[in-house]
Image: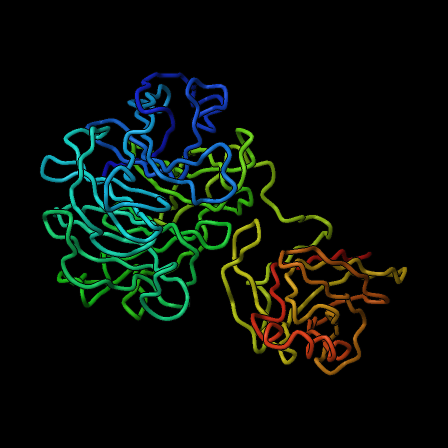
Amino acid sequence: MNQIKFFLLASFFSFFSFNISLAQSINPILKLDDPNFLYAADPAAEVFNGKVYVYCSHDQPDAKDYSSMQDYLVLESSDLKTWKNHGVVIKPREYSWAQGQMNAPDVAYKNGWYYLYFPYDKTYIGVSKSKSPTGPWEEAVKDKITTIFDPTVFIDDDGQAYIYGSDNKVEMGDKGKQMWGAKLKDNMIELDGPWFQIAPTTDKISEAVTIFKRNGVYYWMARAGNKTAYWMADTPIPSPDYPVQPKKKVHTNKEGYASLKGFMTLGQGDAPSHMSAIEFKNQWYYFYHRGKMVNEGSYNRRSACFDPLYFNEDGTIKTVKFSLEKTNKSEYGKGTVHLEAENFSDSYNTVREINLDIDAGESLAMIDEKSYVVCKNIDFGSNTQNKAIPFFIRAIPSRKAKGGTLEVRLDSKSSKAIASIPLKANGQYMSMETTLPNVKGKHTLYLSCNLDNIASQQKSLGKRAKKGNLMTINWLEYSPQN
């Protein structure tokens, strides 16, 4: 598969080129001082006829939310260095049937036509078509073809087309947000059968589902919090519904769904991520956008970017290195020993979740006051001078934990707490710290929450206090003493 995705900005009649060197700063693709600059978001990169075309949604320069998104831009390049800015090429609100907010689009080519799929009123999917990848575009339909959030379209090697998206704001299955996929008929404007859930309900996503294929394996990407998670599978829709059964299900889990492999990016807090991936001239690239980090942007004024994408020998994806990123750690290094939550020895009444902090990995969620985590063989050093051991933890205490304490015990869940950390709740990850007095040698560490002092607050919060986890942990650190 030789496809790439990538987006741009400019006015409808302008057409200009500018040069950037991949050896220099490539990001953002459009700079604030470029002629006819526009904010370009949700880059859907494609490779057509040996060139890269990036189809972008359009943020307004005064945008305070996403309601003003109403048209689409195209960028074109034959080398990823020189770009042609085609500007705004399609305004779906000029169609009598397409109104409202218009989020991320995608484009696919089949039978001599380029089909542009765009959402209107957030989740209704309209289609335009053109004989050229840049337009002019004409109506391919007179009404929505289906309902999904952030549509993406993929054509397999056998010519079969598929459409994917999330049920964000649609609720097609179990409560929550999942990835869905369906076949398209050969005319590219009708579904050919039902929607199928692509990954288990437990694999929670936010939005921005996209797909690509490499070495016979299907990859889905989606935003999970402030990072991009990815899945791998052997078939484009779940078995046994896919008519051609793989002889060996290597990348599909026991339920027949795509298998979650983890995160392919670190967190980005300046704008919600929306991505695509392509191969161009034997190199893979990851396209995405940034917000307030570039072009005097914001959460609602985004700019398209791209960076190289690399794979491990087993086909899994290496963490993308954002060329604009200033930091990729959530305040690591305060302690000399670092331990991630996914590597804790044991736990009780907890749930492993996708880590929504800036770094990759998993987090461990405590459900209630009965929850605790266990870290075995923690070596605090000889500590011959009986110094206090610096101890740090990165976590999100929930509203119902506010006013309580996180307690640290040694060697037994029922032993006396040797330290406690007051819990504050602001809905975000925070780094908390304390000291562990008179500790030396190896111990088993127990962490649990105590809410005994906030019974009145729990009562006043009512139903709100019952929602969500008690506390979600990313990592802990400590500094042994000699």
225 sits to left or right of 439: left
For the image, the number of numbered tags is 0
| Percent position of residue 89, x then y | 28, 29
| Percent position of residue 367, x then y | 58, 74
Foreground residue, 245 or 425?
425
Give above or below for 205 relative to 463. above
Task: Identify the image quadrant of residue 11.
Answer: top left
Query: Residue, x 40% and y 53% (percent of image)?
Result: 207
Foreground residue, 58 or 106?
58
Task: Identify the image quadrant of residue 452.
Answer: bottom right
Q: Residue furthest front?
A: 96
Give above or below for 114 relative to 397. above
- Quadrant containing the N terminus is top left
- Quadrant containing the C terminus is bottom right
Query: Residue, x 14% and y 58% (percent of image)?
Result: 192
75 sits to left or right of 22: left
| Percent position of residue 26, x then y | 45, 25
Query: Residue, x 52% and y 46% (percent of image)?
Result: 266
Q: How is the image coloured?
A: rainbow
384 sits to left or right of 226: right
Q: Residue furthest right?
A: 385
Give above or below for 265 relative to 250. above
Give above or below for 212 relative to 395. above
| Percent position of residue 474, x then y | 60, 59
